[in-house]
Image: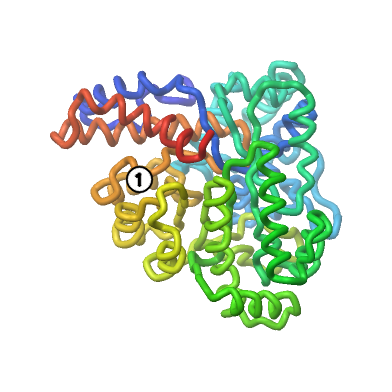
Amino acid sequence: MGLLQEDRLFPVDEGTRALARSLYATVKDLPIISPHGHTDPRWFAENEPFPDPAQLFVTPDHYVFRMLHSQGIPLEAMGVPRADGGPTETDGRKIWRLFASNFHLFRGTPSRLWLDHAFSEVFGVNERLSAETADAAYDQIADCLARPEFRPRALFERFGIEAIATTESALDDLRWHRMIRESGWQGRVVTAYRPDAVVDPEFAGFAENVAQLGQLTGEDTATWEGYLAAHRKRRSYFKEFGATSSDHGHATARTEDLPQAEAAALFARALTGACTAEEADAFRGQMLTEMARMSLEDGLVLQIHPGSFRNHSRPVLDRFGRDKGFDIPTRTDYVRALRPLLSAVGGDPRLTVIVFTLDETAYARELAPLAGVYPALKLGPAWWFHDSPEGMRRFREMTTETAGFYNTVGFNDDTRAFCSIPARHDVARRVDCAFLATLVATGRLDAEEAPEVAHDLAYRLAKEAYRL
């Protein structure tokens, strides 16, 4: 028996399962639109082999190393680099054996589904990973990685990816995207504009980052007008490399629409480091509305990823830096928080604002009603901690009755783990087909409508919402 059950994630009832199976057959081989994520554009630019199985599956994947760390395993033992350049494990086989001997920790998690899918479908590993099978699996994957057909561009094509968006800082020179473009390779890898470092007064080095933004654009970013002009220039530069969206990872969903004189004064305080935590949050909120107005000018889709208490562990942040598995969901208000932005531009159908959440209690109470009335607002799919079969099902159950399907934007995988991309899309397609089959079986959707909806959720909505 292989690692994957053929009817995984389909309903238990045989009749409804058959409906889900038939719907899935119509969408399982559709091209993948991956409109937001964190894969490294350098992979596709240089097209070098991935170093080893541990560097592919363990060291860069916070879903993996946070679970292992929760059981007391040091991040250093998994090869996670230290901020100070201090020693960490570099022996890929040793890291892999540690991972394999603790693979039971992933039972019942979405990570287990993704990993098993990649092991089986990509690398032909069909024995359950364990301490006993660790070396055989490592050798098989390592042998594959040495072959040309397992280099990043070949896997991109094998996975059926039509388009993928990476995410770069506003200060990034986009050298890897330039290299991709100049290589002549036809794979569509685009960037997305992530300005957190230059819109968040609490981001380390904010004033220096803003000065660098000025140097890159030739604008006087010590002034409010010059600062906004610099953003417009950088957004235009990102569009040259295919960007169709901006992305904003703020602590809250707060937006503001202050008079420009007040916004300028708030910006001046932020540059001097004199603003309070409340003022920093207000400035981030003002910048979301400013970015929305810029989107009306240049067409970039505005993504808001709020509600994560980032870098919760101070010792881990100090030792390893940002984004090391200690980002924790928080309660998030949307009704009051989004009102200034939506009052300013939310009625304009030319604008697309895609909102995500880590607070599932907001789905039915706040987000679905908002998306169900404002033309500019769309709901992003179940995200991060809820990027799971149960999370996807809950998302559909709590939003469809108010927002329908067509105020959502399909699926995106939002991942750094390249080989999990087809697995994640497969999970989403299976869960959506199971949900649609249940609607058909209970008389809430015509059988003739279901295949069209399945296609929209798997492909069309993401392609159109992100203008890809």
- Which quadrant would residue 250 be assigned to in this image? bottom right
Residue 338 on image: x %, y %: 43, 65
Residue 30 on image: x %, y %: 45, 22
* Category of crowding for the residue at label 1, using alpha-carbon neighbours closer than 10 angstroms: few (below 14), some (14–19), many (at least 20): many
| Residue 343 left/right relative to 52 | left
The residue positioned 24% from the left and 30% from the top of the image is 437
* Number of marks: 1
The residue positioned 58% from the left and 41% from the top of the image is 244
Q: Quadrant of the N terminus?
A: top left
- Which quadrant would residue 19 be assigned to in this image? top left
Is residue 99 visible in the rendered image? The answer is no
Is residue 384 visible in the rendered image? The answer is yes
Q: Is residue 277 above or below residue 135?
A: below
| Residue 236 left/right relative to 446 | right
| Residue 412 left/right relative to 273 | left
Residue 227 on image: x %, y %: 71, 64
Q: Residue 191 versus residue 382: which sits nearer the camera? A: 191
Q: Is residue 221 above or below residue 276?
A: above
Q: Secondary structure at mark 1?
A: loop
- Which quadrant would residue 99 be assigned to in this image? top right
* Colour scheme of the rendered structure: rainbow
Name the amino acid, label 1: Asn
Circle 1 residue: 407
Residue situated furthest left in the rendering: 443
Q: Residue 217 versus residue 64: which sits nearer the camera? A: 217
Residue 334 on image: x %, y %: 40, 65
The residue positioned 77% from the left and 37% from the top of the image is 176
The residue positioned 54% from the left and 35% from the top of the image is 34
